[in-house]
Amino acid sequence: MSKTHFDREHHVKKATDVGDPQCFKGEAGPAKFKVGDRVRVRDLPSLFYSRTMVYTRGAECTIAELVYESPPAEDEAWDNCDNPEWFYSVIFHQKDLWPEYPEAYADDTLETELSERWLEAV
Amino acid sequence: MTPERKKVMQHINIGCQLQPALHVPQHAPFPDLIDNAHFRAYTRAVHDVGGEPDVPIQWEEKEEEVWEHNTFITCEVLAWRGVWNAEERRRRQNVDVGQTQYLGLSYYGRWLLTAARILVDKQYITNSELSDKMHEVKKRYE
């Protein structure tokens, strides 16, 4: 259902003197994962918009840090801030992402941020 | 043919070169010719190119031009005034433009196009006002 009245100052009212994503602190509820957890990136449909890179879908990674709470990009891209969730910094092994990654560099990693809806426990 | 019509014909000819192709040309296929994999490919967010096979391109450093700075500032001001947020701007600049414009226009070209688009989409200006203004400004340089 569309909102009857859209307040285009809703974000500035919330974030002024606080900052973004600090203004969403405490709104996501308890975090589902903790540092060190092994998780897999869900291959959810991403019709219209997503920032969860296709090359990470279905790959396993480790939670490195709980970084902040914020609306997922898929909602924020329509200026919807109703459902903030936890964002995690996650670490992949490069060879888990690229099938032809040379064995000689097996320790190489890639770190990026993903929101909670994209992660499931392994 | 008038110079204006020549321009129109040129536009039509360039437009038809921008057909998406899967090595064989695709044009308005019947629904049963699109399997799930191709539906996903066609409807993907086109900015999500990390990992897609492609040929190497040469890295070139380029200083920003005045119109590019002005475009950047215009887009930031639109954010400060609550017209959009950074994620909505990215969605419109990088995905909503479609693959042809995403790959075919310059970086700040997409920013500028999208700044105009958001103002029309959210009814701060009308499309006809934009059209009249563009025409008026164009005339100054003729």
Image: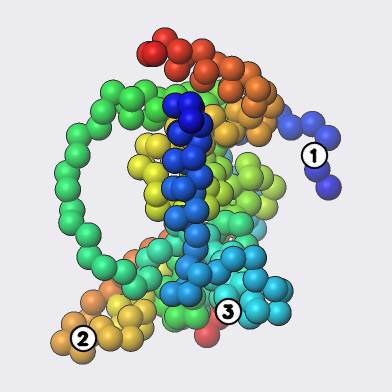
Disc 2 to disc 3, how far (Cα)? 29 Å
- Up the image or down, B79 lies above or below B57; here it is above
Residue placed under numbered mark 3 in the picture? B37
Q: Which mark is residue A3?
A: 1
Graded by Cα atoms within 10 Å as few (under 14), some (14 to 19) or many (20 or more), the crowding at tag 2 reads few
Q: Judge from the rendering whether residue A4 lies leftward or rightward of residue A86; answer left or right.
A: right
Precedes in sequence: disc 2 or disc 1: 1
Q: Position of residue A105 (x, y in %)?
A: 18, 82
Q: Are marks 1 and 3 in contact (CB under 8 Å)?
A: no
Q: Amino acid at mark 2?
A: Pro
Question: Which one is nearer the viewer's eye here, B81 or A117?
Answer: B81
The label shown at residue A54 is: none
In the picture, measured across the screen, residue B87 lies left or right of residue A14, that is left
Total labels drawn: 3
Q: Is residue B78 positioned above or below B107 on the image? A: above
Q: Secondary structure at mark 3?
A: helix
In this view, the residue in front, A14 or B134, is B134
Badge 3 amino acid? Ala
Secondary element type, mark 1 = loop
Q: Residues within 10 Å of mark 3 (few under 14, many from 20)?
A: few
The secondary element bearing badge 2 is classed as: loop
**Relative to residue B21, is residue A61 depicted above or below?**
below
Badge number at residue A102: 2
Residue visible at 46% across and 55% down in the picture: B18
Residue B122: image x %, image y %?
67, 31
